[in-house]
Structures are given as structure tokens and as C-alpha cells.
Amino acid sequence: MAIRILLADDHPILLDALENLFGLQPDFQVVGRHLTGAETIDAVHRLRPDVLVLDLRMPNGDGLEVLRQMARTDSPTRVVVLTAAVSDGEVLEAIRLGIRGLVLKESAPRTLVECVRRVYAGGQHIEPQFLTRAMDASHQRASGRGELEGVLTPREMQILRLVADGLRNKEIAQDLEISEGTVKIHLHNIYEKVDVDSRVELALLARSKGFV
């Protein structure tokens, strides 16, 4: 089954290039391309693509507003942000709003293609240069919180490491021989203890602390 992707960017030439790039791959189907945030939100709800490749700089509702609208409606579409430039605050908000991938436009085309494949499969891909920046912005307030080992139980530390390795809840449950429901409870407790809002942000925190 082809990966159904939607493309959103305010530059028609780039949209042409992206459509050609994914059109050359046998496992992709481009279901739409849009220039504005409003058009993109409508298309996400109407077409329900597997993955949205999204620019943050767009008229009539920027990329962050698209992400906010998707979060409000609990959209199942996974998002890869493709951007030329992004601030620390935008990186952090995009992560909190649930993006699974973040790629710079200056990256090699194959990086974007592999990122989309990984995100579709349930993984994540945040380019390394964003990791330290995002966690610095997110955890400046956490300097007095203590190291992770001091606030998490041994079981929570096991789950933290597995999340950082990219494992999904079902895989974590199988690895630790516990139920998926128990994994979800542990994750909720971990989020509360280390003050993060999403799985991706938790993985970034673990990596910034050297657990991967």
C-alpha cells in the first residue's frame, strides 16, 4: 500500500520539486499540494493523508496554526516539518504539537524521503542540530529538578530508554513483559515527573542526557 502524502508550502516551484521527488518513489502517492495554511487544514480533514509534509512559513494560517488545528481535532495524520529556518521556540512548540519529523530544506532529498518513511512506520526523525537547541529551550527551567535517575523509578528509566530508542508502546510492552496499558500509565507518570508534553520531547530529553 502506498504512503499517501500531502504537501504544503507557499512556493510553487518547491511544491513541483517535492511532487517530482516523491513521484519517483514506488511507495508514495501524493494526494494533494497546497500553498496556504487554510487550504492545508481543509485538505488534511478531507483527504486524511498518512503523512503531511509541512512548511512553517505560509500565508493564511502558518504551519504552527495548522498543527494547532490538527491537535484540536486529534487528526491521525503524522507530520514532517520541512523548513528553511526555524527558531528555538518554533521547534519546541512544533514538537509539543506532535510533529514526528523535522528536516531542513538544505538537506539531501533522500533525507526527507527516508524521514517520511520512518514517520509513516511509527518512528521519528528530528535532525541532530535541533536536538540540543530544543532541549535547551525546553529545560532551562529544569536545572534545579535533579537528574533523571533521581526522579524516575528503575522501571520508568527502562521505559525512558526504550522510548529514546524509538520503540512503540506495543514493542515496549513485549520487551518488558507488561501490558500496553501499564506502559501508558508509566509514560503518563514520566511526563509528569520530568515536565514534558509529548513522546518526542521525552525522547529528546533522554538523548540530551546521554541515555542513547
Image: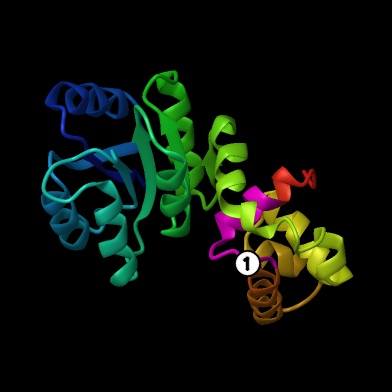
The residue labelled by disc 1 is 195
Within the magenta stretch, is there residue 201? yes
Viewer can see residue 175: no
**Residue located at (31% from left, 56% from top):** 67
Left or right, residue 100 beside residue 144: left
| x and y percentages locating residue 7 in the rendered image | 24, 39
Where residue 191 appears, x then y in whole percent? 64, 70
Q: Amino acid at mark 1?
A: Asp
Which quarter of the figure is the C terminus placed in?
Answer: top right
Category of crowding for the residue at label 1, using alpha-carbon neighbours closer than 10 angstroms: few (below 14), some (14–19), many (at least 20): some
Q: Quadrant of residue 8?
A: top left
For residue 133, above or below residue 162? above
Residue 175: name its quadrant.
Answer: bottom right
Q: Secondary structure at mark 1?
A: loop
Q: Is residue 24 above or below residue 75?
A: above
Residues in magenta? 194-205
What x and y, as percent, mark residue 75? Answer: 32, 65
**Which residue occupies 63% across, 51% down?**
140
Q: Say which quarter of the image contains residue 128.
A: top right
| Above or below, 191 relative to 165 | below
- Residue at 36%, 24% (x, y): give it: 105
Given residues 38 and 30, the one toward you in this image is 38
Along the line of sight, which residue is nearer the eye, 117 or 149?
149
State the count of labels: 1
Secondary structure mostly taken by the magenta-highlighted segment of the chain: helix
Left or right of 148 on screen, residue 185 = left
Residue 127 located left or right of residue 165: left
Residue 169 percent coordinates (x, y): 64, 66
Res. 197 visible in picture = yes
